[in-house]
């Protein structure tokens, strides 16, 4: 494994990634692991590290009750406990106890969910199944981290006696203090206190000779002294002895507990190493959630979809801006990507994004990209970014780049991934471009993978004609002269130098002079790139609009199918219900008829009885007869006699549509139906009263009676006239063509069959004379051929 240069992590900002992961750790145990993160080429190790982090990410997303605190670093305590005769303090044992409790919680969690999180469960191999030290500490140390009174029998006796003596001395001192206070020997608002570990009373300095005892301290002003009365001297001495005895007993208990811990030091080291690793993995998972990172597929090629620079994305998010993701595909056929485009167009950002994300992946971190992406593993990672001018070694920027290129060409192989930003710059362009081209050819021969950013045209041309290499362009909005920060692989990019200069305001004559210096061929090449970019933007806009309409069409189609399904189901239910009711009516009618016949027979055909029975049967028939639908009578419109002229109001005889005559051409009339113009024959029209037309429009709310929506829903572009007589065909064809023209339908089909060709000739002779028809032809042979006439209507 080989990384170049030594400060590679700083150059690609991976050190900042480490810092962010370090911030997610809850203890120094996890922080220690962050510093150990490094680049790996071991596929098995990386697979395991990525799976561990992904499993913990799932724990965080699911909100599982996992221990969240007390990942205590007990290593300093273990070092201290290694020395014979030493002992740990109460607070140190308390922290060890808290850490063991957290350890127990982690073990219980992974034991319970070992099937859901198998990689994390495997880490339990570092932990002993049972560490009884936790119980031993709990018997001695309470929940607050203090030695329990019953930690030993001796300690219990000592503390009991100590409590008794402290209570006794307080009573005596309270009595003395009240007496002294009554004599005015004490300051205002004073009380019994402790000085030097002995209980004393405050006394005004001028009265200190009035009370027998020992002065232990005085106030800052010297106006008050703290005096131990002679009456409590023996009691204070007893308390002091008991405190010494307590201290020795506590030390004895802690020494014994430390001796027990000493035997578990190796076990505890492994267990808390596990805790540190869990804290570290959780920190990686937390960071992954912040940058929306995933565990992509590990394969042989680099096929990234929507990769994002995590640090840039976090910075833009704070500004409430979105990041433009990068999609990149490199394989054995296209190993070297040469990215070109304008300054500040995103070339360097794209290069650094790929470099950082790839490095993160080979350090076992989840990466910000689409889950469908594929990542591959490299053995070597080289990068040449930024100004490496070295004053101490007397190296210029260009010399430094050449030193890097020397290293690249000497060590690059098929398992190498390299990055070069602004390839060839730093010296005279003519020579810099030539050297850069030669170096790129050498790197291509080595079989390595790499990404290069450049402005040099010769490198773009080299990439377009060399196997293993491919061009990439940073897209640019040529209309607004603004970068889009999108990488497009497969074509070179333009620097848009002249366009940007013009936008900035450089005088036109200067730009023209510059173009002349560049040469006509180069200018034409840049113009071609500009045109391609502009047309691509337009096509993408059109494609987005088409896709939007397709989605809307699919939505409407789904709604139509759903509605049709519902209507079909309702129709079936209605028919079934009608059949059931009809069956019941038939049964009831049959029963009535049988009853009538039986009654006639029983009455021996008596005429009066027979007439009565017949009336009852007729009444029953009337009761089950279906009701006639109520038809609303429409007021008839007065039809006028006389010839039809321009400006007259007319009505179409076949469909009742009301219209106004705009023009008359022979036997044809141009009519206006609402906003729709149409040509119809005069014999299909009848003249009506203008007054009647106004009343009709008013009654309809000024809406034309010709319902285009319903006609469109009912109209079929196919007319089948097979088996029809000639006089029928004439009227059918006239109505069919007129309605299709009025509804704005362009293509119609008339199905007349082949036969002797009589209907076909009649059809075509008629439509040939119709002004609405633009042309006609045979249908395709697979769909009827000469048996079907395709009719094209005028627009």
Image (tube, grey):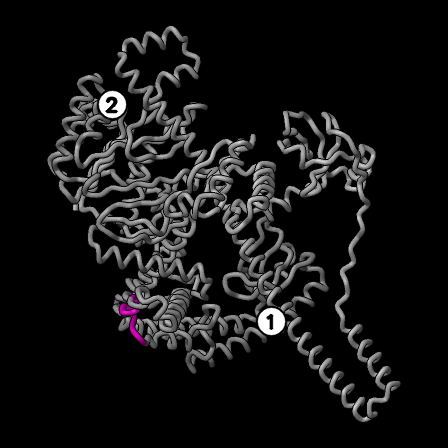
Horizontally, is 180 left or right of 534 in the view? right
Quarter of the image with the C terminus in it: top right
Dividing the picture into quadrants, the one containing residue 739 is top right
Q: Residue at x 40, y 44 (%)?
A: 785
Does 128 appear in magenta?
Answer: yes
- Front-lying residue, 628 or 170: 628
Residue highlighted by disc 1:
170
* Residue 388, position as x, y percentages in the image: 24, 28
* Residue 750, position as x, y percentages in the image: 50, 44
Q: Residue at x 35, y 39 (%)?
A: 326
| Circle 1 residues within 10 Å: few <14, some 14–19, many ≥20 | some
Q: Residue at x 83, y 83 (%)?
A: 613
* Residue 121 makes an appearance in the image: yes
Dividing the picture into quadrants, the one containing residue 670 is top right
Q: Secondary structure at mark 1?
A: helix
Q: Nearer the viewer, mark 2 or mark 1?
A: 2
Horizontally, is 585 left or right of 231 in the view? right
For marks 2 and 1, the one nearer the N-term is 1
User: Image height check: is 114 above or below 309?
Assistant: below
Q: Secondary structure at mark 2?
A: loop
Does 462 appear in magenta?
Answer: no
* Residue 587, position as x, y percentages in the image: 69, 81
* Residue 393 makes an appearance in the image: no
* Residue 350, position as x, y percentages in the image: 33, 35
Where does the magenta region start and end?
A: 123-129
Dividing the picture into quadrants, the one containing residue 418 is top left
- Front-lying residue, 291 or 157: 291
Residue highlighted by disc 2:
456
Toward the right, the furthest residue is 608
Distance CA(mark 2)–CA(mark 1): 93 Å
């Amino acid at each position: 494994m080989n990384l170049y240069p030594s400060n590679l992590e700083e150059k690609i900002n991976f050190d900042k990634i480490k810092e962010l992961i370090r911030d997610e750790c809850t203890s120094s145990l996890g922080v220690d692991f962050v510093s150990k993160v490094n680049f790996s080429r071991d596929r098995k190790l990386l697979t395991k590290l990525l799976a561990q982090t992904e499993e913990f990410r799932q724990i965080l997303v699911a909100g599982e009750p996992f221990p969240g605190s007390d990942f205590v670093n007990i290593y300093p305590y273990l070092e201290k406990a290694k020395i014979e005769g030493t002992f740990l303090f109460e607070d140190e044992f308390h922290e060890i106890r808290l850490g063991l409790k957290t350890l127990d919680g982690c073990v219980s969690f992974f034991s319970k969910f070992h099937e859901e999180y198998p990689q994390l469960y495997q880490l339990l191999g570092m932990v002993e199944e049972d560490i009884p030290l936790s119980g031993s500490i709990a018997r001695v140390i309470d929940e607050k981290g203090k030695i329990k009174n019953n930690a030993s029998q001796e300690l219990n006796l000592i503390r009991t006696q100590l409590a008794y003596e402290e209570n006794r001395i307080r009573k005596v001192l309270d009595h003395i203090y009240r007496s002294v206070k009554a004599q005015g020997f004490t300051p205002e608002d004073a009380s019994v206190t402790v000085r030097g570990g002995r209980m004393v009373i405050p006394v005004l300095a001028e009265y200190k000779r009035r009370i027998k005892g020992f002065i232990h301290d005085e106030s800052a002003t010297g106006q008050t002294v703290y005096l131990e009365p002679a009456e409590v001297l023996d009691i204070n001495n007893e308390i002091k002895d008991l405190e010494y005895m307590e201290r020795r007993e506590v030390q004895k208990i802690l020494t014994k507990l430390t001796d027990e811990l000493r035997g578990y030091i190796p076990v505890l080291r492994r267990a808390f190493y596990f805790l540190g690793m869990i804290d570290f993995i959780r920190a990686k998972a937390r960071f992954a959630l912040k940058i929306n990172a995933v565990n992509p597929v590990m394969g042989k090629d680099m096929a990234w979809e929507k990769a994002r620079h995590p640090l840039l994305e976090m910075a833009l998010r704070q500004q409430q801006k979105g990041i433009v993701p990068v999609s990149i595909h490199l394989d054995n056929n296209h190993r070297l990507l040469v990215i070109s485009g304008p300054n500040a167009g995103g070339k360097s950002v794209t290069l650094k994004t790929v470099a950082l994300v790839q490095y993160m992946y080979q350090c076992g971190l989840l990466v910000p990209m689409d889950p469908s992406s594929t990542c591959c593993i490299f053995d070597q990672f080289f990068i040449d970014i930024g100004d490496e001018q070295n004053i101490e070694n007397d190296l210029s920027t260009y010399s430094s780049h050449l030193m890097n290129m020397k290293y690249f060409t000497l060590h690059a192989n098929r398992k190498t991934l390299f990055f070069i930003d602004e390839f060839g710059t730093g010296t005279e362009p003519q020579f810099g471009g030539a050297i850069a081209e030669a170096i790129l050819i050498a790197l291509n021969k080595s079989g390595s993978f790499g990404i290069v950013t450049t402005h040099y045209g010769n490198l773009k041309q080299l990439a377009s004609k060399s196997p293993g290499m491919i061009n990439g362009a940073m897209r640019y909005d040529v209309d607004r002269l603004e970068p889009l920060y999108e990488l497009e692989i497969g074509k070179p990019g333009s620097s848009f130098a002249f366009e940007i200069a013009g936008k900035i305001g450089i005088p036109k004559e200067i730009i023209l002079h510059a173009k002349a210096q560049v040469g006509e061929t180069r200018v034409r090449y840049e113009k071609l790139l500009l045109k391609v970019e502009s047309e691509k933007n337009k096509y993408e806009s059109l494609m987005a609009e088409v896709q939007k309409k397709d989605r809307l069409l699919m939505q409407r189609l789904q709604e139509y199918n759903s509605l049709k399904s519902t209507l079909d189901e309702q129709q079936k239910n209605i028919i079934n219900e009608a059949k059931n009711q009809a069956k019941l009516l038939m049964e009831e009618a049959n029963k009535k008829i049988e009853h009538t016949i039986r009654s006639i027979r029983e009455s021996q055909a008596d005429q009066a009885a027979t007439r009565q029975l017949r009336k009852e049967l007729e009444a029953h028939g009337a009761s089950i007869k279906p009701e006639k639908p109520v038809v609303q009578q429409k007021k008839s419109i007065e039809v006028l006699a006389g010839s039809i002229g321009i400006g007259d109001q007319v009505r179409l005889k076949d469909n009742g549509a009301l219209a106004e005559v705009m023009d008359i051409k022979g036997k044809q009339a141009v009519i206006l139906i609402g906003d729709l113009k149409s040509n119809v024959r005069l014999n299909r029209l009848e003249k009506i009263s203008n007054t009647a037309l106004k009343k009709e429009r008013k009654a309809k709310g000024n809406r034309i009676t010709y319902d285009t929506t319903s006609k469109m829903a009912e109209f079929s572009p196919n007319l089948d006239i097979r088996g029809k007589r000639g006089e029928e065909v004439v009227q059918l064809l006239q109505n069919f063509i007129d309605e299709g023209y009025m509804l704005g339908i362009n293509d119609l089909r008339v199905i007349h069959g082949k036969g002797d060709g009589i209907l076909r000739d009649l059809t075509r002779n008629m439509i040939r004379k119709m002004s609405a028809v633009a042309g006609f032809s045979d249908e395709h042979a697979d769909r009827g051929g000469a048996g079907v006439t395709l009719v094209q209507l005028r627009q």
